Amino acid sequence: MATAWLQSSLRGALCRQLLLTLMVFSFDGEACRKVIFNVPSKLEADKMVGRVNLKECLRSADLIHSSDSDFRVLDDGSVYTVRAVVLSDEKMSFTILLSDTKKQIQKEITVLLKHQRKVLKKRHTKETVLRRAKRRWAPIPCSMQENSLGPFPLFLQQVQSDAAQNYTIFYSISGRGVDQEPLNLFFIEKNTGNLFCTRPVDREEYDVFDLIAYASTADGYSADLPLPLPIKVEDENDNHPVFTEVIYNFEIPESSRLGTTVGVVCATDRDEPDTMHTRLKYSILEQTPKSPGLFSVHPSTGVITTISQYMDREVVDKYTLIMKVQDMDGQFFGLIGTSTCIITVKDSNDNAPTFKQNAYEASVEENTFNVEILRIPVEDKDLTNTANWRANFTILKGNENGHFKISTDKETNEGVLCVVKPLNYEENHQVILEIGVSNEAPFTRDVLPRLTTINRALVTVHVKDQDEGPECSPAAQYIRIKENSQVGLKINGYKAYDPETRSSNGLRYKILHDPKGWITMDETSGSIKTSKILDREAVTSRNELYNITVMAIDQAGRSCTGTLAVNIEDVNDNAPEILQDYLVICKPKMEYTDISAVDPDEPVHGAPFYFNLANTSPEIKRIWTLSRVNDTAARLSYRKNAEAQEYIIPITVKDRAGQSATKNLRVNLCDCTHPSQCRSASRSAGVILGKWAILAILLGIALLFSVLLTLVCGIVGATKGKRFPEDLAQQNLIISNTEAPGDDRVCSANGFMTQTANNSSQGFCGTLGSGVKNGGQETIEMVKGGHQTLESCRGAGHHHTLDSCRGGHMETDNCRYTYSEWHNFTQPRLGEKLHLCNQSEDHMPSQDYVLTYNYEGRGSPAGSVGCCSERQEEDELDFLNNLEPKFVTLAEECTKR
């Protein structure tokens, strides 16, 4: 049987005293089951003998006593020796008395100690199996005191195996503290099984050692299975509690109420948890400043709270607390730890701003604005440059007209009073303002009774007089004029006045802006006249007033401007107008269509409108009918048997005052499913000319008439007739199809001529007909297709030959005419032209116009000096000898006359 080391023994005197106490009870005891312990012949002091099950005998026992003073019994039934005991006989017995003093019950248990003297023998080598008695290889729990003072080696307990009754057993151990760190802390006696500790142990480093005990014979066989042997290190209060922070920093508003949580402090203890060694209690050792005491700490949780609501940051803004924590639940012998707690009092708006004085004065000249007139300082004890300190100024009274504005200077916290709207000395010589001031943050101080948070002061503003110009007041003045009034209608106009004299004398008026130029103004009186008939519908927005900008000027040249708002009263001068011009009705899907009208006049002269068919053919009236939809619309319906075609339907619309208008409405009654089908069909069937196309056509017609007029004038001039000079054909008739260099005109396939260089005129292709000289301009009529004026052949006071105005060769294939046409057209005209050319400006015959010029050879330095030529001919004239037959015939016919 395993035994443990024994604690302190009870003294014999105590046992005798208990026996005397038990003798007071007068009742009979009841015996329980006998318990037998096998023990060695010699028992040391404070050694455990065994354990008795006391609960099985008397569960409610509150008094336990041993009949033998050499033995003591613990509450859990463990039996220990008080002193060393030697068994002289093989047997020894004593009694354990159990008593229940409340129920007066007593029972006893007989304990028998046996000692067997047997000679232990060694296991024979032929024995393969050890013969064992009932297993008893189970030690009681063992513990040792932390930081024990010894003496070392310190005996802990004895380990024994029941196999030791028959065989020689050797004991050994392993585990942490033996063959693991910390090494050699424990050892066991091989023969006796006594377990020893060699040095002190720190529980915070090792709280338990789990050893394994082994029992084996001399030849190495295991007498029992390995036995777990836990050794618990009993805690000693050897660690001071420590706060988690060396210095705690907390903040709390100065306006905090009673019981407000400031913060929580916390400490730890390395000793064994859930014991008195780690049961901590918190307290405040010291507060700085000491008075008044404002804080307390919960002893168990470490929560710091306020115990007063009269903290004032302006008096004390920071508190320092020395915190203490003690284990052993705060008992005087407990270990102590300390820490510092700094509590900063945060500012609250518990001080209202105040004016330094109750009344202020300032002055300002009239008609000035956006100027600073006064700075108002205030005092506030709260923290500077915070919302609790910054001031908000308000004008409580006296600023009903909005002349003043007050703001805060962010740097100085002063109120800055400004004039933002001009003051008038004639209206008010002085203005009294009531100024209020408060903070940006709301007032938070809880005081009874509640004090007002707005401080007030009076400011008297003196207005200084100025010599000022005219005043246009009111700035906008209204008059009424009826629409379509006669020109020259006189009406009272705009009036300004001198603020000093309150009179309009000496002022002049002038219109600065009149949108339509309908009004004139008298310079002296400001009255107006209509210069044109007023049309209300011509105003941009018909419902708005017709505004005229007016200037009033005094004798010193100072001025003001105002607005004359003319309300043009409407008259019924506009008939309603139908909005639609062209409508498509799909037959038979659409049985009708709606038409609507508008009237630009006022509603009193407008709707309801009355629609009806104007005087039209009976066919239209038979097919089409009108019915009312609403005040501004009517419904146009047709009969079922109406043919699908386009109709012109005249419709008259009349307003409530009888003003009417008739409009021819084009209605396309079409066999379709959607109106867009008929619109596309009508566009493909014919082209509808717009106004610009019609204008282009008219301009073309006018141009044609001008061409014809020029032609007629040429014919009339030719009737005066002169003979063509005989030698004209030699110099003035140029071959038409020459291909000589320098030709600038090309005849196109359509009979028109284009000029490519050195000439800016264009005309019809053909042979030159007749030319009329008139002030240096020659008109040349073409054979076919009209006439054209050649600007390149004009010159002031110069004469030109036909050769100088020739247009180059002609495309004979595309521009050829029959001989009869050419002869009939040119013969009378050429004669008349030559006759005119042979006269001077006074219509007298001249010998210098038509003369015969002979060819002077190539490269002649002298050019042509005829009156019809102003430049030297550079081309060779040999082609005149090779004229085509038609031109030869033409020349012959011309010379006959």
Image (tube, rainbow, N blue to C red):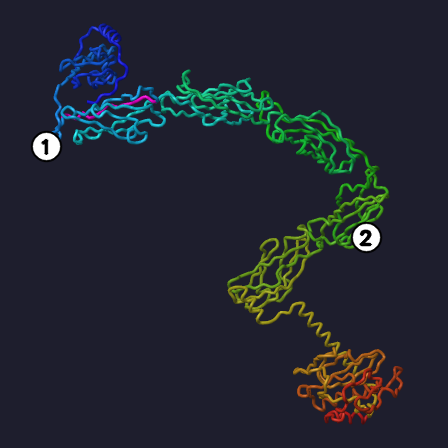
Which three-letter amino acid code belongs to the residue tagged 1?
A: Lys
Reply above or below: 822 against 519: below
Q: Of helix, strand and loop, which one carries label 1?
A: loop
- Which residue is painted at 63% across and 59% down in the image? 578
Indicate yes or no whether the magenta region holds residue 30.
Answer: no
**Residue 284: percent from the left, percent from the top?**
48, 20
Can you say which quadrant of the picture contains the C terminus? bottom right
Which three-letter amino acid code belongs to the residue tagged 2?
A: Gly
**Is residue 33 in view from this perspective?**
no
**Residue 697: percent from the left, percent from the top?**
69, 72
> Marks 2 and 1, Cα distance to the nearest angstrom?
160 Å
Indicate yes or no whether the magenta region holds residue 136.
Answer: yes
Residue 770 image label: none
Look at mark 2 in the image and give the residue it sits on: 488
Look at mark 1 in the image and give the residue it sits on: 126
Q: Main secondary structure of the magenta part?
A: loop
